[in-house]
Amino acid sequence: MKKYHYTYGHKIESIIMTGLKCSPKGTSRKNKDGKWYNHIGAREKPIIWFSSNPQFEMTARKPRYKFDEYRNLTTTDVSLVDDVKEIGLFRFVVPSYLNETIKPWILLRPEAGIALIDFNRINKAGKALGGNPIEWFGLVMEEEWSLCVHDFKLQYLDENMKWHDCSQEEGIAIAKSKPMANVNSLNLGSLV
């Protein structure tokens, strides 16, 4: 079974240069000691996320924000096609030699130290977005480590919702050609 890491175009160059970064989920926060803890103070390890969903994993999408006429920050309703046109949607295909290392989401919870309440919240939020927790996988990492992607195949999604292989250099060029290539953190939010 193939596994993918889905992402936006404005992150492609950084991922290629520095690798996939760990991403803590749930209600975890970094403490003064530099380690991640969940909402009840238990130690939680970060995860690099993957999906076996061959379409774009909807839980990887981020809400887009804009200011309304009163200067309040609100979310905008943006289609997947809009994301393809404006930012670019990409996926890294996991090399087969890593398939045994990457574990199903249900097995990650205890290894990562994710509280059951947070596990259930993530499942509920993901399902509300059209995700399927059975298709979620991850790699528990130690702190700020990253996973090199030089052996990963890179693919981009076109406006007809078809995936195409591209070199990492081509992926960077495609991403930089998008109107929102230099999007900042105010434009995209977190899902869970």
Image (spheres, rainbow, N blue to C red):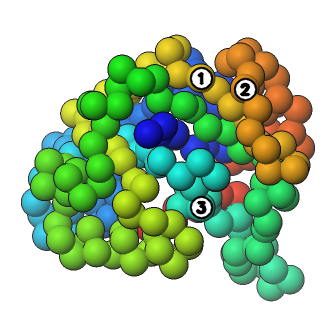
**Residue extending furthest toward the bottom:** 70
Q: Please give left or right for residue 131 compared with residue 43 in the image.
A: right
According to the picture, the residue beneath numbered tag 2 turns out to be 165
**Closer to us: 48 or 184:** 48
Give the amino acid type for the residue marked by disc 2 in the picture. Asp
Evaluate if marks 1 and 3 touch, with contact meaning CB atoms under 8 Å apart. no
Give the amino acid type for the residue marked by disc 3 in the picture. Met
Q: Residue at x 86, y 39 (%)?
A: 178
For marks 1 and 2, the one nearer the N-term is 1
Question: Is residue 8 visible in this depiction of the protein?
Answer: yes
Q: Quadrant of residue 72?
A: bottom right
The C terminus: image quadrant: bottom left
Residue 58, numbered label: 3
Residue 35 at x, y = what percent? 20, 44
Question: Is residue 18 visible in this depiction of the protein?
Answer: no
Q: Residue at x 70, y 77 (%)?
A: 74
Closer to viewer: mark 2 or mark 3: 2
For disc 3, the neighbor class at 10 Å (few under 14, some 14 to 19, many from 20) is some
- How far apart are the alpha carbons under marks 1 and 3? 20 Å
Give the amino acid type for the residue marked by disc 1 in the picture. Lys
Q: Please give left or right for residue 134 compared with residue 71 in the image.
A: left
